[in-house]
Image (tube, grey):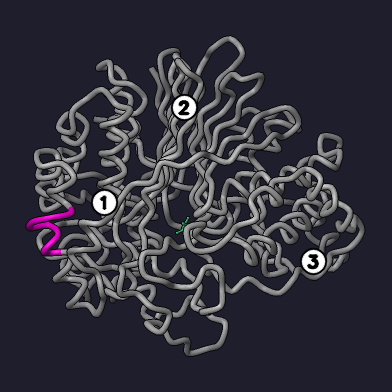
Amino acid sequence: MTTFRPFDEQGNMIRSGRACTGQTGVVSAGRAEASEIGRDILAQGGNAIDAAVAVAFAMGVCEPNANGIGGGGFMLIRDGKTGNSVFLDFRENAPAAATPSMYTPKAPGSNYDKDLGNVYGGKAVAVPGDVAGLLYALEHYGTMTPQQVISPAAKLAREGFVVTPLLSKDMEEHQPQLMQYGDGWKIYLQDGKPYPVGSTLRNPDLADTLDKIAQGGKDAFYKGEIADRMVAQVAKDGGVLTHADLEGFTVRVLEPVRATYRGYELISSPPPSSGGTHTAQILNVLENFDVASMEVNSVEYLHLFSEVFKICYADRSKYMGDPNFVKVPLEGLLSKEYARELAQRVDLTASQKPEAGNPWKHESMSTTHFSIADKDGNLVAVTRTINHFFGSCVVPEGTGFLLNDEMEDFSIDPTSTNAVCGGKIPLSCMSPTFLLKDGKPFAVLGSPGGIRIISSLVQVISKMIDHGMTLEEAIASPRIGDNVQDLIIYESRIPAETIETLQAMGHKVKAYDDWNRIMGSVNGCAILEDGTLVGAADPRRDGLAMGL
Ligand code: GLU
């Protein structure tokens, strides 16, 4: 088993050494243990989808604060033989009985309120889609059995994994809630306290749950004992999840969003994610400016990006929602002509007020993304989440896994396109993405980071295409946030003089540390001209890329 640790003896994060190259395949995931499991599956002759499913189940074990079988996600798959890409949507949907009146705001306009009921406890829980989605991918695009791809994750749960500074910190922040609901105290705390950094967390209950899924397939999760436990726990903790909700969960196979940026083709997530659409929209607007001539992270560069973010995110808050419930003007949002109109609105000399604020999102930054590429042109990009770190903090007794708080991704404004409704899927930003050049794979990308998934991806994509940075350099380069609230958040590696000049132009600013996971965590692959595969994991979190 890998001995890689993203932190030193003193518990300080190590910000280098997260990249790799490979000839047969590369896997870049949020934990070394999961990358290793994916690489082993490729070495055993499994394809990229087999590896992806194995990585996903393993990530749920060793980054339990950010993803797991109690959540959901998106998977973008490219078949190297046909060149076709398909998008699997296994995001959670609202239980049938959910209504906007479940969440009464204490303060007007505030979507994130720990007392509202959409963050912690049973009312926060939407119908988990992860198991259905992963097994669907395996059945339709993989070559291995559920046992082959799930057993490494079960072994990891049984033998344990190292607790990192980030995981320990998240345990500390959620300690009161983990004590409160179901088995959280038993699995994700040690004697009621966070696991110390460097200690080993073993989760035999989750190992048993995974074994049951490996043997019984989807039904072992959505029917029978595990389903009984989920329904009972959610009811005990005040929620409305039913057996019918679980049995009725279906995976959606969607056409991805397609766009171009300076000759590169972008393939990414369609609604109910806003991610692919607005990544494409922002890039379409940026295409109207000579970004390549601007120094990366200079005043003119950061001003342009933050102004374009403001304009495009305003559209997001106004128009986006589950297309089965609201009409989304997708063609318009993706149109190059519309982007030219928006580009005219950018004032290159001063910060402008964004349109009416976006009440949808608080600053979430959990979730996890991994990317896989192999020598045959197969690509897989997977972003999965339980929403906030530790999700709803509800662990159904005896199961070992956390249920999501995806209901918080709905707006509590009943007039919003993203209002709560039974069966509806909450709006997402998650954006598993491919870039192709002349029809050939160029990069596989994605990130956690809530609303900043889009802004982080745009910065990495532009740095690779406009400035010719390597994947590793583009990921490591300091980033700014989305500027939705008319506030530029930035990593402190950006020089103080640059920030002062931006302030003089009318920008409000807020500093974060030199490296901060609030800017997402982009785990990606690049495919070089000579066929070499490159993997790079974001040093802002715990990931590592591995190749063979
Ligand atoms: N639940 C969020 C979404 O679907 C992701 C949260 C995060 O990345 O932290 O967009």
User: From the viewer's perspective, is 445 left or right of 159?
Assistant: right
Where does the magenta region start and end?
Answer: 222-229
Q: Look at mark 3 in the image and give the residue it sits on.
A: 507
Give the mark nearer the N terminus: 2 vs 3: 2
Dot 2: element:
strand
Res. 25 image quadrant: top left
Q: Is residue 538 in sight in this rendering?
A: no
The residues tagged by marks 1 and 2 sit, at their Cα atoms, a distance apart of 24 Å
Q: Are marks 1 and 2 in contact (CB under 8 Å)?
A: no
Measuring 62% from the left and 65% from the top, which residue is drawn there? Answer: 317
Q: Look at mark 1 in the image and give the residue it sits on.
A: 69
Q: Quadrant of the C terminus?
A: top left
Q: Amino acid at mark 2?
A: Arg
Above or below, comparing residue 501 to residue 287 in the picture? below
Q: Are marks 2 and 3 in contact (CB under 8 Å)?
A: no
Q: Amino acid at mark 1?
A: Ile
